[in-house]
């Protein structure tokens, strides 16, 4: 076959050989890049998808919260879609609610902004404590004396209008851990 | 037969291949110290075999992962053994990898021309760690879930690409089905594929270069190595005592114990040691088959024995299913990542930059240093540097790991987290048996509808800020300032008898911290001074209304109960205020159906109802939705189902494993 080709297409054999090699490599690469490319496109697709965003949910009535300003932990269970499954009630996380002296309510996501463990509440004096890397947060969510976290607890938006009616509605959201900026995910 | 083999060999060249594989010369003879590579190959093989069989029973989705692992562990014949071998071999493999690395570095087997093989080996080490990390999540239990959340959050702090990287790894912005499918594909497909490819290259290169012959040891050489070890462990002992920060002191003792052992060894060498005379012995090369393979086989058998020992001794953990809304105080990585985890607690790694340095930059520098070993170790001094560096790395790893475990052993929150996760898992096993299987929505739904687990949690979250339960919050936690009756045993004869005793009624155990301490009932109890016999009869009568779990007819039977009601209607004047047995509802709480499920649900739902405390209600909130006077609805704090779960738990009513026959 090569000799026939050579006979039909006279020219520099070395150059032709180079062309053959180059075309083989390029064509081979192009063919392989189809499945690999498609695969990678699906792999990285979560980057382009939108996050689930904040979810507005009623957690309590103001009068249910302790009057002394100590926080109470509320589970966030809401409708959620995870890939192909739509859960009517899915546990999403938990939120600390705390009555403020000015009549308002403060809400914090209980997920530690350091690495994402669940933060617990110890006492008004000791504040919140993360059982993983031992960060301490003060009652108002700010960083305590010993705190390896890059920022204080993530506060969540409390609906002021509903608060007037005595209802605590919170926009529940998760934030990227390990960075100073409070970035929603 | 021979002709048949010849026929095959003619077409495959198998005879030559087998000869090459088996009849490798082992210079200086077979040795025990050459077995590590083979034990590792064996461990990898065990993982492939058990992994493939586990794969046949595993289903990677958020509603089936835990469930399928539960089934493998508890229902499939020998599933527990299969999973146990896979789990424990993975743990032992990490140790074998480190031993293999130590031996390669000490024998300077990374020197030319073996640099590439060393690098492939290091990559293999990291692939193995990645397989372990991804495997940790697959059971989708609390332990794996929270550890993976931490690990993937750390991936998220990589500058620039971190956020996207994290999304790619977990398959979106939230943990769920795609986190599992991705981790499973990595764990069972991508990473093992890469592992096999590299192991083939690793072994090919090993065969190409031949075994690195262990050098004949001199007394001076041996002293050098042991002294080096002594210096390293001496330093580690000092470090361990400096960092020692808790009551138990066994961490420094381990390191100092090793140090003492090394000192003894050095002393022994100085007194009795001599040069290893193997160099002067007539040199006799061994053969891989069967000399070395026999040793390898014995070592592999020892590995298998160790694995089985752990499977039978410690069994294989499966905590409760993953639940992001259920705080888990025991979120920890597997032990071989514990040192990194512990390191991040140090204030020097504080803040975003500190975390980046501690979690990404420091480990990257250490990995780079290991990669550079063949280049550093070209000279004799360089080789010493490598050996010291490796000992320091391992020593640091040991100290940090021990510090982490020591801290946890003394941390009440951690211990309670582990105990609760185990209790949940145990209860879930019972519930699955009672239910005859797991519902399609997953095992978590069983826990969420169980009064014993969910009721206790709801009580701790919603009631225990005022009401203690046996002094605590019902979940092992404490109630800081109890201000309402302790509800342990509520509705039982004993509990009601306490209520009728004026002294106890006005104590903190019942209403001592409420306004009822000074109320009409307290005064009435003080006035009438009930006899013990009356208290017994009335509590028997009232307990017969609620019939909480464990209720039985009192001694004296129905007659005794009737006598109690008779006292309440007549001598004790209870009926003046309370409705009893459906008659004459007074101003005080109705005692008709007292502490029955319905009564309690109504009470928790709205204690200020006119049949209950009415306007005299102290601070007890209404937990169910109810209409206000202006006609609007006040949303309740809890759903009716939640209130029923709390009531079910307080009444001790939950399905028990003994109720069904397996």
Image (cartoon, grey):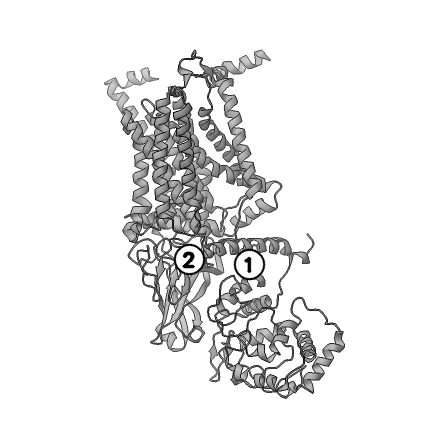
Mark 1 → mark 2, Cα distance in angstroms: 20 Å
Q: Quadrant of residue B57?
A: top right
Q: Nearer the viewer, mark 1 or mark 2?
A: 2
Tell me: residue B409, above or below residue A89. Answer: above
Q: Give the residue at mark 2.
A: A118
At x 48%, y 70%, the residue is: B465
Crowding around mark 2 (Cα neighbors within 10 Å: few <14, some 14 to 19, many 20+) is: many
At x 66%, y 73%, the residue is: B493
Q: Give the residue at mark 1.
A: B447
Q: Position of residue A57 (x, y in %)?
A: 42, 67
- Chain on which label 1 sits: B
Q: Position of residue B601 (x, y in %)?
A: 58, 73
Is any atom of residue B470 visible in this view? yes
Q: Secondary structure at mark 2?
A: loop
Quadrant placement of the C terminus of chain A: bottom left
Q: Secondary structure at mark 1?
A: helix
In contact (CB < 8 Å): disc 1 and disc 2: no
At x 57%, y 44%, the residue is: B72
Q: Quadrant of residue B556?
A: bottom right
Relative to the observer, which residue lies in front, B91 or B516?
B516
Quadrant placement of the N terminus of chain A: top left
Q: Is residue A106 left or right of residue B541?
A: left
Relative to the observer, which residue lies in front, A61 or B397?
B397
Is any atom of residue B133 visible in this view? no
Q: Which mark is residue B519?
A: none
- Chain on which label 2 sits: A
Q: Do the residues indicated by labels 1 and 2 lie within the same chain of the protein?
A: no
Q: Is residue B105 left or right of residue B286?
A: left
């Amino acid at each position: 076959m090569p000799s026939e080709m050579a006979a039909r297409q006279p020219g520099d054999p070395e150059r032709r050989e180079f062309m053959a090699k180059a075309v083989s490599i390029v064509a081979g690469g192009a063919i392989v890049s189809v499945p690999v490319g498609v695969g990678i496109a699906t792999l990285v697709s979560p980057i382009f998808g939108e996050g689930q965003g904040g979810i507005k949910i009623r957690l309590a009535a103001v009068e249910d919260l302790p009057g002394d300003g100590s926080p109470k932990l509320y589970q966030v269970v809401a409708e959620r879609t995870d890939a192909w499954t739509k859960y009517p009630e899915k546990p999403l996380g938990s939120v600390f609610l705390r009555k403020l002296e000015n009549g308002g309510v403060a809400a914090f996501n209980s997920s530690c902004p350091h690495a994402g463990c669940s933060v617990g509440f110890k006492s008004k004096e000791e504040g919140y404590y993360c059982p993983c890397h031992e960060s301490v947060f003060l009652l108002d969510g700010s960083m305590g004396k010993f705190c390896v976290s890059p920022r204080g607890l993530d506060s969540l938006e409390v609906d002021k209008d509903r608060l007037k009616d005595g209802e605590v509605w919170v926009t529940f959201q998760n934030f990227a851990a390990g960075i100073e900026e409070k970035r929603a995910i | 037969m021979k002709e048949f083999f010849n026929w095959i060999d003619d077409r495959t060249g198998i005879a030559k291949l087998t000869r090459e594989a088996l009849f490798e010369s082992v210079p200086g003879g077979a040795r025990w110290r050459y077995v590590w590579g083979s034990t590792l190959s064996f461990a990898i093989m065990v993982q492939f075999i058990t992994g493939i069989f586990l794969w046949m029973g595993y289903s990677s989705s958020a509603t089936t992962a835990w469930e399928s692992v539960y089934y493998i562990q508890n229902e499939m014949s020998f599933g527990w053994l299969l999973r146990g071998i896979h789990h424990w071999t993975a743990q032992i493999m990490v140790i074998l990898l480190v031993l293999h690395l130590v031996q390669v570095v000490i024998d300077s087997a990374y020197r030319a021309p073996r640099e590439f093989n060393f690098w492939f080996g290091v990559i293999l080490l990291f692939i193995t760690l990645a397989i372990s990390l991804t495997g940790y999540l697959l059971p989708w239990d609390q332990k794996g879930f929270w550890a993976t959340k931490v690990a993937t959050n750390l991936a998220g702090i990589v500058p620039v690409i971190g956020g996207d990287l994290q999304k790619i790894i977990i398959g979106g912005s939230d943990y769920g089905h795609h986190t599992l499918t991705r981790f499973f594909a990595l764990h069972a497909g991508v990473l093992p594929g890469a592992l096999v490819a590299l192991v083939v290259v690793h072994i090919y290169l090993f065969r190409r270069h031949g075994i690195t012959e262990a050098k004949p040891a001199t007394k001076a050489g041996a002293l050098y190595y042991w002294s080096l070890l002594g210096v390293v462990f001496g330093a580690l002992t000092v470090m361990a005592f400096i960092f020692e920060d808790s009551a138990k002191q066994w961490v420094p003792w381990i390191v100092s114990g090793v140090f003492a052992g090394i000192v003894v060894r050095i002393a022994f060498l100085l007194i009795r040691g001599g040069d290893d005379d193997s160099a002067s012995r007539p040199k006799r090369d061994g053969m891989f088959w069967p000399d070395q393979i026999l040793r390898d086989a014995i070592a592999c058998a020892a590995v298998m024995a160790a694995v089985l020992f752990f499977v039978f001794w410690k069994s294989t953990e499966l905590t409760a299913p993953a639940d992001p809304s259920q705080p888990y105080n025991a979120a920890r990585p597997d032990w071989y990542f514990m040192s990194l985890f512990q390191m991040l607690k140090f204030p020097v790694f504080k803040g975003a930059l500190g975390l980046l340095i501690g979690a990404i930059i420091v480990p990257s520098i250490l990995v780079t240093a290991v990669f550079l070993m063949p280049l550093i170790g070209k000279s004799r001094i360089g080789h010493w540097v490598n050996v010291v560096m490796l000992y320091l790395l391992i020593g640091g790893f040991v100290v940090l790991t021990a510090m982490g475990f020591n801290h946890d052993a003394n941390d009440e929150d951690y211990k309670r987290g582990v105990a609760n996760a185990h209790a949940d898992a145990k209860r879930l096993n019972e519930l699955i048996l009672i239910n005859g299987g797991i519902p399609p929505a997953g095992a978590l739904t069983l826990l969420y509808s169980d009064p014993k687990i969910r009721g206790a949690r709801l009580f701790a979250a919603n009631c225990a800020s005022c009401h203690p339960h046996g002094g605590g919050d019902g979940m092992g936690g404490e109630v800081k300032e109890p201000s309402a009756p302790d509800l342990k045993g509520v509705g039982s004869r004993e509990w009601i008898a306490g209520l009728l005793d004026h002294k106890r009624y006005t104590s903190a155990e019942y209403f001592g911290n409420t306004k009822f301490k000074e109320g009409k009932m307290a005064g009435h109890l003080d006035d009438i001074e009930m006899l013990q016999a009356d208290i017994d009869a009335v509590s028997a009568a009232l307990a017969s209304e609620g019939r909480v779990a464990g209720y039985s007819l009192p001694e004296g039977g129905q007659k005794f109960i009737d006598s109690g009601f008779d006292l309440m209607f007549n001598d004790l004047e209870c009926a003046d205020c309370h409705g009893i047995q459906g008659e004459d509802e007074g101003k005080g709480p109705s005692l008709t159906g007292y502490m029955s499920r319905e009564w309690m649900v109504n009470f928790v739902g709205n204690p200020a109802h006119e049949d209950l405390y009415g306007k005299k209600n102290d601070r007890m909130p209404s937990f169910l939705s109810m209409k206000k006077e202006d006609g609007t609805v006040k949303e309740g704090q809890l759903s009716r189902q939640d209130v029923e779960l709390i009531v079910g738990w307080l009444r001790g009513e939950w399905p028990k494993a003994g109720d069904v026959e397996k």
